[in-house]
Amino acid sequence: MSPIWLQEFWRLFMLMLSMGFIGLLFGQTLLFLLITTLSYIAWHLYNIYRLENWFLNNKLPESRGIWGEVFYQLYRRQQRHRKRKRRLSIILKRFKRSTAAMPDAAVVLNKKFQIEWFNKAAKKLLGLKAPQDRNKLITNLIRNPAFATYLKTIDDDKKGIKLVAPNKPEIMLNICVTPYAGNQYLLMANDISPLHRLEQSRRDFIANISHELRTPLTVIQGFIETMRDNEEIAMKQWQRPLLLMDQQSARMRNIIDDLLFLSRLECCETLENTHNKAVNVAEIITSIYEQAQLLSTEHNLTLEIDQNVTLNGDAKELRSAFSNLVFNAIRYTPAGGDIKMRWYQDAEGKHFAVHDTGDGIAPEHLPRITERFYRIDVGRSRDKGGTGLGLAIVKHVINHHDGKLRIESIVGKGSVFYCDFSR
Ligand code: ADP
């Protein structure tokens, strides 16, 4: 079928032709053509009037020809639009009902982090108020420097952040902000107070028990030492048991000290970072290097440091983390192997790296290697005086300094432990 406008064109052409012919019979061609043109325009104007009337009063007109087709097409479009609107409003209602029933807070933010929309739980957990808080900056309502820092890194940090709920110190929240639709962000916050309390009591338990065990152990160690110093006892068959008792109690003491250090690190992890002192890392690493040289004459130790690079942080924690990595390298590298320590800065930040040519770690162990008491070879670790807590301490200290622990390792060839600091 030919298009409507073409049909209309031919209709008009035939009309003009026949009216021109009739006009010719009456000797009034021009007059007849003029009357036909005016009637044609009047018919169009009348239909435009009916179209406007339809839009204003919602009364569907009926017509023939081109206008009949226009009215029909518009009517179909209107029906389709109505159906879509009805469907969308059902979806919207369902969405509103489900977000209202959701126990987690959901907040939609624009690219400037201004609030565009939030659900019922956001009112309860984050203390948001409608409509006053719409268009306000989220950082004005969640006033926490750690949250402001987190917002700056959300594009590369997929993890959430743990925060105390605004004006509700008893509620602990896990907040996660995800970019979506190109220029918006979705903030989700869930109440993790029960889990947090559980973690807290676990931490307290470990800290308390370690503390309680330390005193009796000190007494036992004291007696063992006295007995070993007593020539009369030491000379007899007790010599070896006393030596073993001394070694084992020293091992227990090391484990307890590491556990206490770990629980101190954990308790401060959620608090605002208070490390603002510049630490002379080069000095710390040099002293660890000297200690390592005394401890191991069988390894080839090298040091490569940039004296000018400092780091803001806690000197004691950093010393502990770095020495754990260096002493691990000594422990797990056979005699004659190479161990290299590096402290340097590049475009990505500051780095401490320990390279060794030791046993290496198989890829399946890497995801769990920083867990407490996770060892690849328990017997070997014990023989070498390891507590199984070294890498857990390293990870916590590095996290505490907003850094990341990166491990590259090939079994049989060696490992590189990197501490990457971005600030
Ligand atoms: P440990 O006190 O047993 O050394 P860590 O937490 O320091 O405990 O290390 C966990 C395990 O990771 C170790 O038992 C060892 O198997 C492995 N490991 C750590 N450092 C190295 C290394 N440089 N080379 C090979 N394996 C390592």
Image (tube, rainbow, N blue to C red):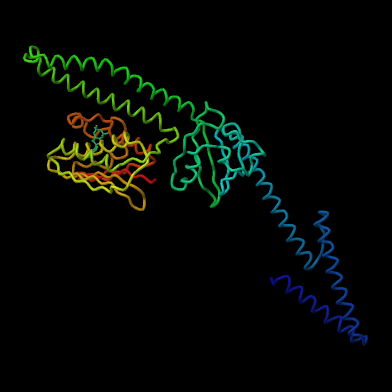
Instruction: State which quadrant residue 51 falls in.
Output: bottom right
Instruction: State which quadrant residue 382 falls in.
Output: top left
Left or right of 271, for residue 360: left
User: Of all residues shown, which one is farthest toward the top?
Assistant: 232
Give the x, y percent position of residue 168: 55, 28
Instruction: State which quadrant residue 123 falls in.
Output: top right
Give the x, y percent position of residue 219: 23, 14
User: Looking at the image, which is closer to me, 96 or 180?
Assistant: 180
User: Looking at the image, which is closer to me, 381 or 353?
Assistant: 353
Left or right of 34, for residue 238: left
Give the x, y percent position of residue 69: 76, 64
Residue sitting at x 78%, y 64%: 68
Residue sitting at x 36%, y 31%: 265
Can residue 101 be seen? Answer: no
Residue sitting at x 19%, y 46%: 302
Residue sitting at x 52%, y 33%: 190
Give the x, y percent position of residue 254: 25, 26
Left or right of 150, for residue 103: right
User: Looking at the image, which is closer to me, 375 or 302?
Assistant: 302
Left or right of 330, for residue 24: right
Task: Give the number of callouts.
Answer: 0
Quadrant of picture, ligand 1 = top left
Where's the N terminus, which quadrant? bottom right
Can residue 83 be seen? Answer: yes
Where's the C terminus, which quadrant? top left
